[in-house]
Amino acid sequence: MAAFDFRPGALSAAELSAAVTAREISAREVALSALAAIEATDPALHAFNEVTPELALAAADALDARLAAGTTTATAPPGPLTGVPVAFKDNMNLIGTHTTCSSRMLQSYQSTYDCTAVRRLLDAGTIPLGKLNMDEFAFGSSTESSAFGPTHNPWDTDRVPGGSSGGSAAAVAAGMATITLGSDTGGSIRQPGSFTGTVALKPTYGRVSRYGCVAFASSLDQIGPFAHTVRDAALALAAICGQDPMDATSVSRPETETQAFLAATDPAARDLDDVTGLRVAIATDLLESDGLDPRIRADVLAQAETLADRGADLIEVTLPSTEYGLSAYYIVGPAEASSNLARFDGIRYGLRVSDPEPTDVMDLYLRSRAAGFGAESIRRIMIGTYALSAGYYDAYYGQAQKARTVIKQDFARVFAQADVLLTPTSPTTAFRLGEKASDPLAMYLSDIYTIPVNLVGTAGLSLPTGLIDGLPTSVQLISDYFNEAAIFRAATTLERAVQFPRNDVPCGV
């Protein structure tokens, strides 16, 4: 057997899958290597809420047996993710695991069914390693609101990994998993991707089923992958996308779209250094935003020039209504969260106080919810309930939806003349643990460039482009609805030009 360094971060998913499929290494060896990496590295990071060695080894052994028999399933040959170790944000159901949303409210809840995106990734031949830490119910931008303690950034353990999918980002960055899934409601995939130097994709709303992912804001949530390479992110999206009868918001799209975004990252299908004719928009007003690190602004412009040098046409645009995005989001998001979290009442499932025994149903509701929810969850539930209350609905929620429509119109004007919009992902690099925990507004501002994408529903990808003071920085690539192929085309070209030092993370295996 060939000598391979098959730690999760040492090879891309495509490279690792090829080695497993050729039986140069076994899926069991990959699983054991990944589990060893978690054991060695996670105590310093706390990316995982739950590690699942039994599930991982069972899946690996079954895969090895099928490969020995000449197939990975009864009807299909090995796919491009065969034997790849993966893990899932802890708001996604998987039978055999807890799904806690990093909340005391659900700390004992065990999944009774599978999230569609999780199941599709596992059906692609991947190896499940466990569930990943997050901000409680995905409410946050730093993974500090987790009831089980914060996750630390692998590049500097005194800093946050971003949020709410901080565990998903840190697990990939530190080499504990090759691909992870996160959810993105206002930047919760892309901002952690920026802070940890990982490729992080929020697909178009409806591209991936949300069934089995505990809802935060149903009109904003979308599941997407973290990976080390753009190609791996495309392979993961191809595995999880598609209509699902269990999610009425999932959309049936032509197979040619999947083929297009896979081709956009495939060196056999195109010259990866050539983006001739790609129209790239630069929003000049976004680059003048208060709080934007001037070094990040310079990096965005440098990446635009890199694309222009390789054939892209640069177009200057403005997005004036995006200044209302943060305000609109923090009405729409909490309003939908208030409605979605009403189900956690201490009766049907979730935490139920019993000492002393509640005196009546109202006492049960109040004490169970007060004990189960953390401070940020309570803050958002209260904001959302107020915004939906009689006498205030039109003034707040109604106005926020009108602002959302205007923002959509701005993006439509941009994509009438451009294929890709290039922006910062975050205004700064990763901040220190505790730096913004007591200032909700400062925390919310870290998502200023990502939130409009969720309000509009288009696709966005965070691509690492370099280091600033030893911390990753990135650019965000945004496309029109269901045009992820354009993002992948631009991102692959930039990735090759940048050569981000992904193996230089200090706290990794």
Image: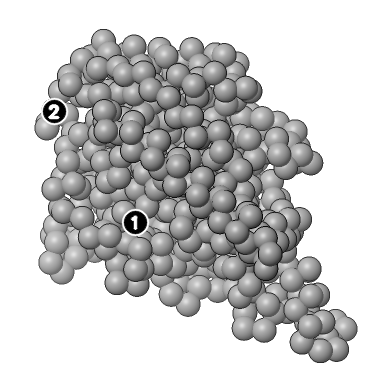
Tell me what residue is drawn at x 17 percent, y 21 percent. Answer: 277
Mark 2, residue position:
270
Q: Secondary structure at mark 2?
A: loop
Mark 1, residue position:
206
Badge nearest the viewer, 2 or 1: 1
As drawn, which residue projects farthest toward the right? 356
Q: Quadrant of residue 101?
A: bottom right
Tell me if I can see residue 452 in this picture: yes
Tell me what residue is drawn at x 51 percent, y 16 percent. Answer: 297
Picture coordinates of residue 313, whole percent (x, y): 25, 17
Q: Secondary structure at mark 1?
A: loop
The one of 162 and 12 positioned closer to us in this rendering:
162
The one of 123 and 480 positioned closer to us in this rendering:
480
In this image, 299 relative to 327: left or right?
left
Tell me if I can see residue 90 in this picture: no
What quarter of the picture does the N terminus occupy?
A: top left
**Residue 315 versus residue 120 in the image, above or below:** above
Q: Amino acid at mark 1?
A: Gly
